Image: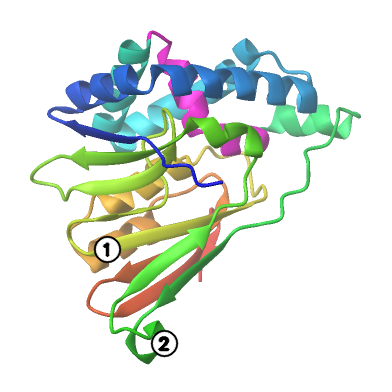
């Protein structure tokens, strides 16, 4: 069965963009909060208040890295009538899973997470594309329960490039492409490295797509300290791609 994704376009200041976004996806965002509250409860016994309390540890690192994205998240919260930490938790949901206390709860016999089948990204260009175009994409193996929360987000934000991304409602970054001809596809790898707090993947991916050059996009991947590991595939419309496995401890 075919299902078209809602397309949400936002523009203006970070706060204005966020409020437009939150107002447009209020229903989907509240569905996402309900789904993850139930999912975290089933897998770890955490209440949603406990999840948002853990997510709070990412607030200052994100503010230091990209204060405009915190403003945008606050606007989303205001537009949807929820709290900033609710929105932050949706953006750091993968990182919360690897929080020390969460890991201990799972080790003590809480219900295990359903095994993920895993995502795969691709780039095709030159003779491999078959039609002379540059193609980039991925399959996204995540939970069917979030299906009704997924939207296409178009962000008009001069002088930065215009973006189009596939996101879960409330998230400020994920896979997508920008008007500078850069596409990003990424697959979370999980894992824990140390107790230092790194940036959520949604924030890193949005910062990558905010760049106007492939070198600056690559620089974000190589200098921003992520909290968990991820494989990132950058594809450029000029006809080349760069794949980087990023971890908090180093990149390859």
Residue 95 is marked as none
Residue closest to the eye, 76 or 164: 164
What residue appears at the point 33 percent right and 64 percent down from the top-left corner?
Answer: 218
Residue topped by disc 2: 128
Q: Which circle's residue, 1 or 2, is located before the other in the chain?
A: 2
Residue 62: percent from left, percent from top: 38, 33
Instruction: Tell me where residue 125 sits by quadrant.
Output: bottom left
Residue closest to the eye, 147 or 87: 147
Q: Is residue 214 above or below residue 159?
A: below
Residue closest to the eye, 147 or 91: 147
What residue appears at the point 38 percent right and 82 percent down from the top-left corner?
Answer: 129
**Left or right: 195 with respect to 148?**
right
Residue topped by disc 1: 182
Observer able to see residue 232 = no
Magenta stretch, residue numbers? 81-98
Residue 109: percent from left, percent from top: 91, 29
Label 2 secondary element: helix
Q: Is residue 123 above or below residue 80?
A: below
Label 1 secondary element: strand
**Left or right: 134 with respect to 57?**
left
Residue 213: percent from left, percent from top: 19, 64
Observer able to see residue 16 = yes
**Left or right: 148 with respect to 241?**
right
Crowding at dot 2, Cα within 10 Å, few <14 / some 14-19 / many 20+, comes out as few
Q: Main secondary structure of the magenta part?
A: helix
Q: How many marks?
A: 2
Residue 215: percent from left, percent from top: 25, 68
What's the distance in space between the residues labelled 1 and 2, CA to CA?
A: 19 Å
Q: Is residue 71 above or below residue 198?
A: above
């Amino acid at each position: 069965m075919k299902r078209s994704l809602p397309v949400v376009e936002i523009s203006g200041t970070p706060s204005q963009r966020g409020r437009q976004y939150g107002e447009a996806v209020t229903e989907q965002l509240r569905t996402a909060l309900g789904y993850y509250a139930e999912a975290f409860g089933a897998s770890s016994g955490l209440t949603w208040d406990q999840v948002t309390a853990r997510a709070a540890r990412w607030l200052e690192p994100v503010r230091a890295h990209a204060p405009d994205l915190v403003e945008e998240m606050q606007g989303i919260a205001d537009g949807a009538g929820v709290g900033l930490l609710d929105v932050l938790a949706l953006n750091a949901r993968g990182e919360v899973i690897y929080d020390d206390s969460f890991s201990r709860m799972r080790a003590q016999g809480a219900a295990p997470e359903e095994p993920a089948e895993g995502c795969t990204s691709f780039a095709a260009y030159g003779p491999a594309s078959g039609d002379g175009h540059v193609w980039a994409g991925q399959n996204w193996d995540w939970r069917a329960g979030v299906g009704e929360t997924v939207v296409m987000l178009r962000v008009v934000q001069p002088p930065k490039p215009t973006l189009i991304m596939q996101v879960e409602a409330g998230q400020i970054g994920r896979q997508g492409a920008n008007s500078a001809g850069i596409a990003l596809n990424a697959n979370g790898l999980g894992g824990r490295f140390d107790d230092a707090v790194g940036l959520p993947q949604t924030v890193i991916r949005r910062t990558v797509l905010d760049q106007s050059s492939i070198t600056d996009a690559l620089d974000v991947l190589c200098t921003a300290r992520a909290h968990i590991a991820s494989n990132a595939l950058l594809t450029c419309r000029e006809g080349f791609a760069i794949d980087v496995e990023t971890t908090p401890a180093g990149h390859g």
